[in-house]
Image (cartoon, rainbow, N blue to C red):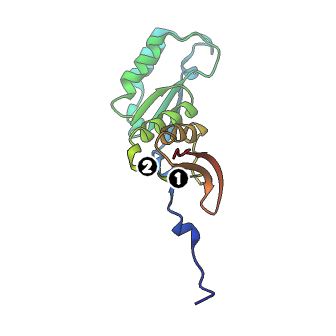
Amino acid sequence: MENEIVNKVAQSGLITINLEDYYSKGERVLFDIKDLLFQGLILREKDIREFVEKENWSRYQNKFVAIVCSVDAVIPTWAYMLLTVHLEPFAKKIVFGSLEILEINLFAESLSKIKIDDYKDARIVIKGCGKLPVPTFAFVELTKLLRPVAKSIMYGEPCSTVPLYKKITTT
């Protein structure tokens, strides 16, 4: 069998980590407090209290919610806290900030559960392309977690990688 095809990638011992596997499934929602402002400028306590009493909070059931004010207005901290009090029984997760900050928080939570010791002296490829939106934060965080234990870290696909790190062995 001189012409037998050998899958060198399969024999390489590389471990591929796909960050999409750490993507938290669920709908992301941006709650923009600007819609509650009087004349688009001022948050009045009476208005926000009326809103929280009338709002159907169950529409946030099992959703990931980012609370933000996208306009230049002074919003007291208690207003964000009041919204959180009403969202918390329904939402899976609530963060202050943009949808990007929400995604970063979700990935930070998922990546914190990785058993890093499982990758001791491993040759790792962090998969680069995919269908889900993976923030750059996740790639940086995973690299930071793996570098102290991995033998090598690469980016891309096992057949075409960009080397990032190789542990220097001393003899």
Crowd band around label 2 with a 10 angstrom C-alpha radius: few (<14), some (14–19), many (20+): some
Q: Residue at x 60, y 50 (%)?
A: 154
Horizontal and vertical percent position of residue 101: 54, 30
Q: Is residue 100 left or right of residue 58?
A: right
Residue 153 vertical position relative to residue 48 in the rendered view, above or below: below
Residue 110 vertical position relative to residue 3 in the rendered view, above or below: above
Identity of the amino acid at label 1? Ile
Horizontal and vertical percent position of residue 99: 56, 33
Residue 120 vertical position relative to residue 15 in the rendered view, above or below: above
- Determine which of the numbered discs, if any, sits on residue 97 in the image: none
Identity of the amino acid at label 2? Tyr
Report helix, strand or loop for mark 2: helix
Distance from disc 2 to disc 1, alpha carbons, whole Å, reads 8 Å
Q: Nearer the viewer, residue 38 or 107?
A: 107
The residue under label 2 is 119
Quadrant containing the N terminus is bottom right
Q: Nearer the viewer, residue 122 or 19?
A: 122
Q: Are marks 2 and 1 in contact (CB under 8 Å)?
A: yes
Report helix, strand or loop for mark 1: strand
Q: Residue at x 57, y 73 (%)?
A: 7
Which residue is situated farthest in the front direction here?
A: 171
Horizontal and vertical percent position of residue 5: 60, 81
The residue under label 1 is 124
N-terminal of the pair, mark 2 or mark 1, is 2
Horizontal and vertical percent position of residue 163: 64, 50
Q: Is residue 76 left or right of residue 5?
A: left
Q: Nearer the viewer, residue 130 or 122?
A: 122
